[in-house]
Structures are given as C-alpha cells and as structure tokens.
Image (cartoon, grey):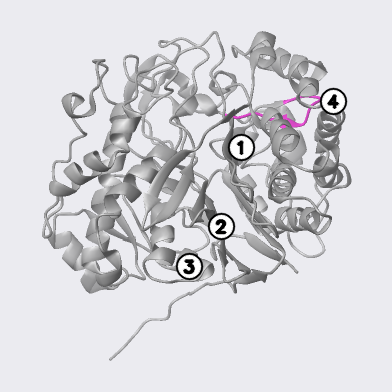
C-alpha cells in the first residue's frame, strides 16, 4: 500500500493560571499579557493588544477601521462595545453604479463601475476604532488609555521587524499599495516589500502613526474625531474623490449595547448586535442545539450534515433579513427563537441536503417590508480582520475583533497621519432596494463575530476569528468541538472544519475521503481543500478556555497567531 507525505502543522497549547491573551500576532499577545501582569484587567489587555495589532499587522486592522468588543465581568455585567464603521452621511443608495457581471472580489456583489465600492476613496466608511478603544478603557478598563496605547506608540515610533506574513501580504497587494503614494511610501518604499530575511531586515517605522496614537492617548477620542487628524483624513479623501466629511467624524460615537444571547448545551453565548456576524452564529448554534452531535462522532458524515444544514440555513436568512436595525425592520427575535430553530430543524432530512434552500418566509418571521433579499456569491478568499481574546485572573473576559475589512482596506493612507483607511462600504450590497443597501449614516452588515461563552454564569470561553464571512461557520464548530467532543482549545482550533459560506461545502482534506464521499452523495457540492499557510478557506481563530481553575489558549497553526499565559 502506497501513501503520500503530508504537511501537518499544529501548536502547543498555552497555559496560564493568572491570565491569558491570544492574538493574531506575537507582539500583540505579549503586550496584552504584560498589561495583565501590571494589574490590568481583560478589557485593558484587549485594547492594548488591538492597538498593537494595528501597528504590527497594518494590513488587517488599525485606527482607520472598526469592530466590536464583547465582555463579561466577574461581577456579572455583560456588554458589547460597538465601534463598527458607519457610512458617510452623503452616501446614497445609487452611489455605486452597477456594471455587468459579478465581481470576483471578496463578497461577489454585482460589479460596480471602477470597483469604487471595493477600494479607493469612495469605499471608505467612518472609522470607529479610536472611539471604541477610548470608550472601552473609560467604561470597563482599570488603566488609563495612555498606558494601554504606549506599546503601540513604541512599535510605531521605534519600529519592529515585519515577519514573513507581513511581507507576503504586502507582495500580494502591491498592485493596490502602488496606487496610493503615501501607502507605498510607508509600507513598500521603492515598490519593494519589507524583507524578513536575515541580513536584510530593517525595522518598519511609522512616525506619523506614532504621533496620531500619542494624540489619541493624550486627548482621547476627541483628538481623532475633532482635531487635526480628522481634518487631514477628510481633506485627503475628498481631494481624492471621496465623500467623507468632518461632520461624519464629529458625529461618530462608539456605543455600549447589550449583547445578543444564545444557548448551546447549557452554555450562554454572548454575541455582537444585529448588523454583524453575531446573529448568524447564534442562529447556527440554535439549530445545532437540537442535534446530539456528541453521539454522532466528530467529523462524521452525520455530524457534518447537521453542521452544514445549520450553517446554510443561517446564511440564507442572513442575506434575506439582516441589516442595520436602526434603518430597516429586522426580525431578529424571530430568527433567534427556539420555535424558529425547531421549525427549520423539522425541514431536515437525514439523507439529503435541502436543495433548494430558501430563507424563512415573511409570514413566519413577521416581516412587513417587501425589500428583495441579497444574493451574495463569494469571490477569491482572503484572510482579513484580526482578533484578540483575553481573560484575567478574576474571570473577566474580553473578545475583540477589529478590521479594515479587506486586506489594506481602501488602500488609502492620509498623509501626515499614518492612518490606513478602511473599505467598509464594501459590506453593503451595492444594489438599491435590499435591507443591506447603501444609505447615509447606516451601519453595514459586517462579518465580525467575537463571542464570550459562559457556563453557570461564569466565564468559560473567549473566542473569535479573522477570515471574512468564513468566521461565522468557524465559531460554532470550535465551540462544538469543546462542548460536544471534550477537546482542549488548541485541539478544537486545529481540528479540520468545513465551510458553507460560498454555497459549496468546502472541507479540509484532513477529513476522511469516505466521509466527504457520503456528503457528496447527499447532494452537497463538496470541495476538498488542502490546508497550508496560504489557505484562507476555514477562517483563522484564536481562543481561550477557562476550565478547572486554569486558562488554556489556542491559535490557528497555519497563521503566526499566538497565545500567552500569565502565572
């Protein structure tokens, strides 16, 4: 019998007794862990690490982006800091004229003339990260914002040595970077990525970003949204053809909102609000809660069929009904109800995929509007967004996801600020007449889905991922790996997964071929995927499990992520 060699990657599990931080870059995780050692809490550590990520992983997140922080305090308080991006007030439903065809970009929306919604000045939404970091520190932290931003300021001012992953992502997107002189000047001078090779290493310094971070540290969010920084950003964007205005910056507010709550096997899952990935994760878990996965066998055909149908159902409802609930009627309570989950489960067949799969009806969900549903394809997968999980010695937990949206966001860096700006307008369906269509001041339907999981009212997990729409399929599977199959956090993250966000059933080729053949016979379009450091098909998670008085951290083995325990 002949076999072939296989490339198998894994990580050892991080252990901590007094705290832990897991993040998408070692420097960020280490900075957050240092905050815990200094006596800071989980929110302090998450804010510090997220700020560092915006410096050392600049193509994923930063001050020019936005996100969510889900938190649970040992005293029993639960909250979400919503610092998502918002469309400029001047945005209109018809601002992105449609061309012919579907775009091969990340989301497969209808093609827009000049790809104006994907990159460049018109793709930029109002950033939320500075306001989110400041609000989180003020309301739920224990250390001054200035102290939490100091590591990021240091890396921006003094520089850091980019790793191979930064070099790779710079090289992949040189076409975009080269379109914007200030971005190229900072990140690819002379059109050449920073090299990670020994003897060729030069620190990447970002002095303009250091000044912007220092102003934020000293003056809080007002220094970003009302001062010179806002004027420089708006001025450059408008000169380049964008529609941002200083009024957009002055009006922006991060907000504290209650988390969405879901149940899974007796655990409580705290998730992000309506215009995010949170409802889709909770809807997936609600349907899976009715299946006894633990008796089916891990990654058996029966278990994967249940997971696939739950993921598919949640996604088809997502594009039909979810949007900014301040602007559009969203049947959120109905979508997340036990009754609706039971009705969707009743449609399942044990031997077949539901084809075609339709969203829940207006009548069943109580929807009164007649807006058409979005029909989203999925283009070339890219690993974008970043995440931090933190749990401190008291059991406070934070789960923070922040993003520019696509890699390098809009590609636009405002001269004199060092701020690389998002392309958050890409989240909107560019066709008018959809729940998630463009509108001035509206929040786009984002993919971010950080969660905190409680067991008996106490912190059990902090979990999140990067990876666009694939995040929402990854989180339920990792949670099930821990709860249903008794895995450690690292094992749960390393285990092979499936993804249904494209419409096809993409499956790690580490899953048994006979299992994939069974799923194909059920009617799924099964696409086996080889996992490696260039693969982006299954999201890239990090997480922390709190169990038996210890903290256990895990990180995607195919990505330079990191977990640091504190003793």
Residue indicated by mark 1: 408
Sequence-earlier tag: 3 or 1: 1
Sort mark 1 into few (<14), some (14-19) or many (20+) by Cα contacts within 10 Å: many
Residue indicated by mark 3: 494
The reply to whether residue 545 is in sight is yes
**Quadrant for the N terminus in the image:** bottom left
Q: CA distance from mark 4 to mark 2?
A: 32 Å
Asked if the residue at tag 1 contacts the one at tag 3, i.e. Cβ–Cβ closer than 8 Å, the answer is no
Frontmost residue, 104 versus 257: 257
Residue indicated by mark 2: 542
Q: Position of residue 357 (x, y in %)?
A: 17, 40
Point out which mark residue 219 bears. Answer: 4
Q: Could you say whether the residue bearing mark 2 is in a helix, strand or loop?
A: strand
Q: Could you say whether the residue bearing mark 1 is in a helix, strand or loop?
A: loop
Q: Could you tell whether 443 is left or right of 496 in the image?
A: right
Q: Position of residue 492 (x, y in %)?
A: 46, 66
Q: CA distance from mark 3 to mark 1?
A: 27 Å
Point out which mark residue 488 bears. Answer: none
């Amino acid at each position: 019998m002949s076999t072939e060699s296989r490339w198998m990657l894994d990580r050892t599990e991080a252990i901590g007794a007094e705290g832990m931080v897991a993040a998408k870059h070692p420097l960020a995780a280490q900075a957050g862990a240092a905050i815990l050692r200094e006596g800071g809490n989980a929110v302090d550590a998450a804010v510090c690490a997220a700020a560092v990520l915006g410096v050392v992983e600049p193509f994923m997140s930063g001050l020019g982006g936005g996100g969510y922080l889900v938190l649970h305090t040992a005293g029993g308080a639960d909250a979400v800091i919503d610092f998502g991006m918002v469309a400029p007030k001047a945005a209109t439903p018809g601002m992105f004229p449609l061309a012919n065809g579907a775009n091969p970009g990340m989301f497969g929306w209808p093609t827009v003339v000049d790809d104006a919604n994907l990159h460049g000045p018109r793709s930029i939404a109002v950033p939320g990260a500075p306001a989110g970091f400041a609000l989180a520190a003020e309301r739920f932290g224990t250390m001054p914002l200035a102290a939490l931003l100091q590591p990021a300021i240091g890396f921006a001012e003094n520089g850091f040595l980019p790793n191979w992953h930064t070099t790779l992502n710079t090289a992949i997107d040189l076409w975009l970077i080269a379109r914007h002189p200030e971005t190229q000047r900072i990140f690819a001078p002379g059109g050449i990525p920073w090299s990670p090779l020994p003897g060729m290493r030069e620190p990447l310094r970002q002095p303009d970003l250091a000044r912007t971070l220092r102003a934020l540290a000293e003056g809080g969010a007002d220094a970003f949204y009302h001062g010179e920084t806002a004027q420089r950003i708006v001025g450059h964007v408008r000169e380049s053809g964008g529609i941002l205005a200083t009024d957009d910056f002055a009006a922006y507010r991060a907000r504290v909102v209650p988390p969405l709550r879901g149940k899974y096997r007796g655990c409580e899952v705290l998730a992000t609000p309506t215009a995010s990935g949170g409802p889709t994760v909770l809807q997936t878990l609600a349907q899976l809660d009715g299946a006894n996965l633990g008796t089916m066998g891990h990654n058996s055909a029966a278990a994967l069929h249940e997971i696939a149908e739950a993921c598919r159902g949640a996604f088809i409802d997502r594009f039909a009904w979810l949007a900014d609930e301040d602007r559009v009627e969203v049947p959120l309570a109905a979508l997340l109800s036990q009754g609706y989950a039971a009705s969707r489960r009743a449609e399942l067949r044990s031997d077949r995929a539901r084809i075609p799969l339709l969203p829940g009806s207006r009548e069943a969900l109580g929807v009164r509007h007649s807006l058409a549903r979005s029909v989203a394809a999925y283009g070339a997968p890219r690993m974008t967004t970043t995440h931090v999980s933190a749990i401190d010695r008291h059991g406070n937990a934070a789960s923070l996801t922040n993003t520019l949206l696509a890699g390098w966001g809009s590609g636009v860096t405002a001269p004199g600020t060092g701020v690389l700006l998002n392309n958050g307008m890409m989240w909107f369906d560019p066709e008018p007449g959809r729940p998630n269509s463009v509108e001035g001041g509206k929040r786009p339907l984002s993919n971010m889905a950080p969660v905190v999981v409680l067991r008996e009212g106490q912190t059990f997990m902090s979990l999140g991922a990067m990876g666009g729409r694939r995040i929402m399929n990854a989180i339920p599977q990792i949670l099930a790996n821990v709860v249903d199959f008794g895995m450690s956090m690292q094992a749960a993250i390393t285990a092979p997964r499936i993804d249904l966000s494209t419409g096809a059933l993409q499956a790690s080729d580490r899953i048994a071929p006979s299992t994939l053949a069974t799923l194909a016979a059920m009617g799924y379009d099964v696409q086996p995927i080889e996992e490696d450091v260039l693969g982006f098909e299954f999201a890239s998670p990090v997480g922390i499990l709190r169990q038996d008085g210890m903290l256990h951290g895990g990180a995607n083995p195919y990505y330079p992520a990191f977990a640091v325990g504190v003793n």
